[in-house]
Amino acid sequence: MMNILFQKCFPESTAAPLLCSAPGRVNLIGEHTDYNNGFVLPMAIEFRTKLALSLRKDKIVHVYSKNLDKHAEFHLTDNFDPSKQQWYFYIAGVLQLLMKQGYATYGADIVIASDIPMGAGLSSSASLEIAAGFAYLSAHHRPIDPIKLAMICQQAEHHYVGTRCGIMDQLIASLGQEQHALLIDCESLHLKPIPLNMHQVTWLICDTTIRHQLASSAYNIRRQECEQGAAAMQVNSLRQANLAMLTTYKTKLSPNVYQRCHHVITENERTLKAAIAMQNQDWLTLGKLMAASHRSLQHDYHVSCKELDFLVDQALSIPGVYGARMTGGGFGGCTINLIQDAYLNEFKQKITSYYQAQFSYPPKIYQSKPQAGVKLAIPEIAIEHEF
Ligand code: GLA
C-alpha cells in the first residue's frame, strides 16, 4: 500500500522507496516521571506510523501525509519557528538535526500514513519522529545507536514543536519488544524488558476521544513546577528526592509545587513495585498500583479530566477489572485497563454504555499485545479497533 502511494505521489522517483514503521505506545505506569529522571513502564502497541522514503540528490524534502491529505516542501537548511506549529515540523526537526550532526546529507521524498489515533496520548508524534529518523538514516546507510536516535527525536520535539517532553515515547518507539513492557530508568537510560505473560488477563485501552488544546502548555508548566521543586530541595532532579525531604521542605514550596513533587516521588515508587508485580503475575497488586497512580495524577498532578476520571471510576466498579488509570500526558486521551479475560466482553459493553449515557457519545476501545519498536518493512497487522 505504501509503495503504491509513494509511486502516485512521486512518479518521477526511479528507485523503490525504503519502507519502515514505528509503533505507538501505551504507558502502563510511571506518568510524568520521565522528565524528572524517574522510572516509566510503557509497551509498544499494534498501531504504527508507516513511512516510505527515497533520498534525493538535493537538500529538498517533500512530504505527503495520507491522514491529513497534505503536502509539504522544505529545504534542509530552512528555519522552523515552533510557534508556527506546522504538522511537518516533527519530520523537519528530526531530519535537520541528523543533518547538522553529520549523520545525513541529502533531501528526501517521503510518504507517511498512520493508524495511531492523533492526540490520544498513544504517542503518534514520537512514532512519526522515530520512523522518519530511522528510515532517513537507513537510506543513508548510517547505523545509529537506537538510544541516540531517541534523544535526537526528543530534541526535535523540544526545539521544533515546542513541547519539552521526556524521553519515554521516543525510547519505546525505538526499542519496544514483542511480549514485553520496558522498565526504563530515565536517569541512566538503562532499559529492562519485563516479560508480559498475560495468561487470562488483557490490557484494554479506552479512548475518551477528548483532545485538549492546552495540553502542551500545561505540560511545560508541570515540568517547570517539578524543576522548581527540585531546585528548592537542592537536588538535580526529583529522582534524588524522597518523601522525608519533601516534608522537610514543605514550607518552602508552593502548594502546587508540593503536590507535583509528591506525585513524582510516589509514582517512581509505584512504578518499581509495578514492575515486580508484573514479573510475578500478581495482577491484584499491579491493579492497586495503577488505581493509586490515577488518583495521584488526578489530585496531586492535576492532569486528568472529567472524562478520564469517569472512565476510571466506572472501570473500577466493573467485575473482573484489576486496575485502571489514565495514560500519557493527560487532559483527555486514554485510560489503560487490566482485565480478566473472562470479563472482557462484559467490560466492553458496560464501559461503553455508561460512558455513552454520561457524555452522549461512545468511547473508543483498542486492544493490543506488546509489539516491537521501529523496523524496516511494514507488517500488515489488523488491530482490533472497536467492537
Ligand atoms: C507525554 C510525553 C512523555 C511523558 C508523558 C507523561 O507523552 O511525551 O515524555 O512525559 O507525556 O508521562
Image (cartoon, grey):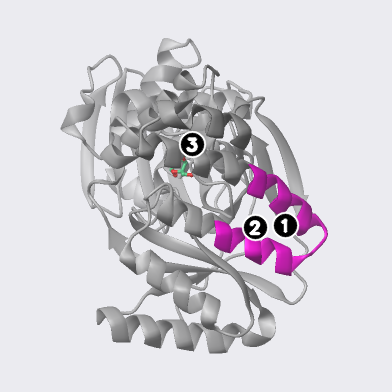
**Position of 106 compared to 294: left or right?**
left
Q: Which residue is mark 2?
A: 370
Query: Residue 32: percent from the left, percent from the top?
Result: 48, 41
What residue span does the magenta drawing correspond to?
A: 269-292
Q: Is residue 158 magenta?
A: no
Q: The N terminus lies in which quarter of the figure?
A: bottom left
- Residue 126 coordinates in the image, percent (x, y): 45, 40
Q: Residues within 10 Å of mark 2 (few under 14, many from 20)?
A: many
Q: Residue at x 50, y 15 (%)?
A: 103
In the foreground, 1 or 210: 210
- Mark yes or no: residue 16 visible: no
State the mark number for residue 179.
1
Q: Could you tell me which residue is drawn at 42 percent across and 59 percent down?
A: 115
**Residue sticking out furthest to the right:** 280
Q: Which mark is residue 261?
A: 3
On the image, the x and y values in percent for residue 307 come to 34, 68
Residue sitting at 42 percent across and 25 percent down? Answer: 252
Q: Residues within 10 Å of mark 1 (few under 14, many from 20)?
A: some
